[in-house]
Image (cartoon, rainbow, N blue to C red):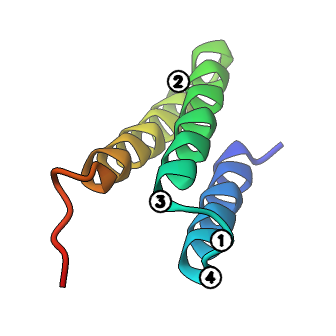
Amino acid sequence: MNYLKKYADQVQSISLAMKSGEITMEQGAVKLQAVAVLAEQDAAAMDDVDYAADLNRMVDMIYNVIEKMKPERRVRQ
């Protein structure tokens, strides 16, 4: 199974839902956190060290996005 594609698709789906107004930014952050946790767990269970490292990089990117979504970090235009 291609976990990178699976989690990238989930992140994209959450992003589109936030942009369309289906979910709030806070709800999106919670969903992104869940995706990050699942990706982290899959990376820990991987035998392929390189693929696990790629998954962990994706997890780091997701956590960085979540950090930027915090209300005190956002810039209102």
| Element at label 1 | helix
Q: CA distance from mark 1 to mark 3?
A: 9 Å
Looking at the image, which residue is at 60% across and 58% down?
11
Q: CA distance from mark 4 to mark 1?
A: 5 Å
Residue 15 vs residue 42: left or right?
left
The one of 57 and 51 positioned closer to us in this rendering: 57
Tell which circle, 1 or 2, labels the residue nearer the N-terminal end.
Answer: 1
Residue picked out by circle 3: 25
In the rendered structure, which amino acid carries the disc numbered 1?
Ala
Dot 2: few (<14), some (14–19), or many (≥20) neighbours within 10 Å? Answer: few
In the rendered structure, which amino acid carries the disc numbered 4?
Ser
In the rendered structure, which amino acid carries the disc numbered 2?
Val
Residue picked out by circle 1: 17
Q: Position of residue 71 (x, y in %)?
A: 25, 53
Dot 3: few (<14), some (14–19), or many (≥20) neighbours within 10 Å? Answer: some
**Disc number lying in front (1 or 2):** 1
Asked if residue 65 can be seen in this view, the reply is yes
Tell which circle, 3 or 2, labels the residue nearer the N-terminal end.
Answer: 3
Q: Are marks 4 and 1 in contact (CB under 8 Å)?
A: yes
Q: Position of residue 65 (x, y in %)?
A: 35, 53
**Disc number lying in front (2 or 4):** 4
- Quadrant containing the N terminus is top right
The one of 65 and 27 positioned closer to us in this rendering: 27
In the rendered structure, which amino acid carries the disc numbered 3?
Met
Q: Position of residue 50 (x, y in %)?
A: 50, 33
Residue picked out by circle 4: 20
Asked if residue 51 can be seen in this view, the reply is no
Residue 72 vertical placement versus 16 (above, below): above
- Quadrant containing the C terminus is bottom left
| Element at label 2 | helix
Tell which circle, 1 or 3, labels the residue nearer the N-terminal end.
Answer: 1
Name of the residue lying farthest toward the right = 1
